[in-house]
Image: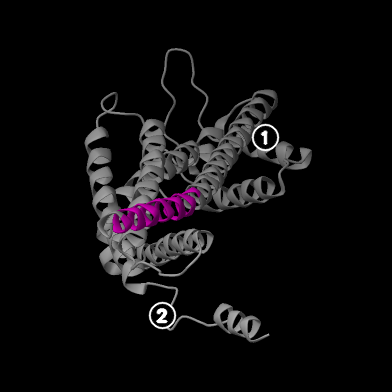
């Protein structure tokens, strides 16, 4: 009976030492942050070296974007491995602890080190200091999104450089008919008429359809302004409205492409981070077992 009580007391005794070696965890996290900064700066330099402002030179935007994503994934994995390995290798040996418990603690150390490093990196990238570090990555993202926005803007930009996106289409409607052997004469600007046409185009474009009444009215305005026949004016209005619709479709396609690219990047980032957490945990478990094996050899 006394032996059973002694064994029960021994099995329930708690070690005065904590199961968490914070010094090893913070050491691994600090190393991971440093590795992330170094690899991010290196990737930014390589990305800037690959692009060129001259058409036909350097890597394409798609190639740079894909390379940037791959580089960020590799950076996450390398930094996670370093964090986990150092966290497992630098912790003190737990005496009298079962092997399975040691494995769990080492795995937890690697995961915690990854968590701390991730929080520090996110905080760093959102700070003023991190703005300089993440400039290369942001430049790549800006190139990709700028290409999509530029395509949409170029389809609706006015020919005279003004900020009114409908100006080009209005000018196209009221372009004078060219006579045989002569160039079309310059036309005066009727502010009230242009404003009315602008409102019609904006309203119809927002509603997604061009009513027959609006088309007929626009054709009458074009015929009275340009000297075209009613049939030719209607054809011109129909052609211009088709160009407006094509511009809208192109803008929607660009926006949808940007949405899909953002979704893909987000999902890949989440997967890369989860894999990074796994790598940190496995690296810590491996390093911890190596540390205990080396310690056992020295004590023989």
224 and 128: which is toward the camera? 128
Within 10 Å of the Cα at label 2, are there few (<14), some (14-19), or many (20+) other Cα atoms?
Answer: few
**Side of 107 relative to 222 (left or right):** left
Above/below status of 154 relative to 41: above
Q: In the figure, residue 161 lies in which quadrant?
A: top left
Marked residue nearer the N-terminal end (2 or 1): 2
Return the x and y of residue 47 as percentages of the image width and height. Answer: 28, 39
Q: Which residues are magenta?
A: 275-296
Determine which of the numbered discs, if any, sits on residue 17 in the image: 2
The structure residue drawn at horizontal position 70% and vertical position 24%, both measured from the top left corner, is 231
Return the x and y of residue 30 as percentages of the image width and height. Answer: 29, 64
Secondary element type, mark 2 = loop
Number of marks in the rendered image: 2
Query: Is residue 24 at least partly visible in the picture?
Result: yes
Going by the picture, which residue comes out furthest to the right? 212
Above/below status of 29 relative to 38: below
Within 10 Å of the Cα at label 1, are there few (<14), some (14-19), or many (20+) other Cα atoms?
Answer: many
**Side of 225 relative to 33 (left or right):** right
The structure residue drawn at horizontal position 40% and vertical position 39%, both measured from the top left corner, is 70
Please check the rendered image and state whether residue 121 is part of the magenta-colored stretch, yes or no.
no
**Side of 162 relative to 2 (left or right):** left
Q: Looking at the image, is mark 2 or mark 1 nearer the viewer?
A: 2
Please check the rendered image and state whether residue 279 is part of the magenta-colored stretch, yes or no.
yes
């Amino acid at each position: 009976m006394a032996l059973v009580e002694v064994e029960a007391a021994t099995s329930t005794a708690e070690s005065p030492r904590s199961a968490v070696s914070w010094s090893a965890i913070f050491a691994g996290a600090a190393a991971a942050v440093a590795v992330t900064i170094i690899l991010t700066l290196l990737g930014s330099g390589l990305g800037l070296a690959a692009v060129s402002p001259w058409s036909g030179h350097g890597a394409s935007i798609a190639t740079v974007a894909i390379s940037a994503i791959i580089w960020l994934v590799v950076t996450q994995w390398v930094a996670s491995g370093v964090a986990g390995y150092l966290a497992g290798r630098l912790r003190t040996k737990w005496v009298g602890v079962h092997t399975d418990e040691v494995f769990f603690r080492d795995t937890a150390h690697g995961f915690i080190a990854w968590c701390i490093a991730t929080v520090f990196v996110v905080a760093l990238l959102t700070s003023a200091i991190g703005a300089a570090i993440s400039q290369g990555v942001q430049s790549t993202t800006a190139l990709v999104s700028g290409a999509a926005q530029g395509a949409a803007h170029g389809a609706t930009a006015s020919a005279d450089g003004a900020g009114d996106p409908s100006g080009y289409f209005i000018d196209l409607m009221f372009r004078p008919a060219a006579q045989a052997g002569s160039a079309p004469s310059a036309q005066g600007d009727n502010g009230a008429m242009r404003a009315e046409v602008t409102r019609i185009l904006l309203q119809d474009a927002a509603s997604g359809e061009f009513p027959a009444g609006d088309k007929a009215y626009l054709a009458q305005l074009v015929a009275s302004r340009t000297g075209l026949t009613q049939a030719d004016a209607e054809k011109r209005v129909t052609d211009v409205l088709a160009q407006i619709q094509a511009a809208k479709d192109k803008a929607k396609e660009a926006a949808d492409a940007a949405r899909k690219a953002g979704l893909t990047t987000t999902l890949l980032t989440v997967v890369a981070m989860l894999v990074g957490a796994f790598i940190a945990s496995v690296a810590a478990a491996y390093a911890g077992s190596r540390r205990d094996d080396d310690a056992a050899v020295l004590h023989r």
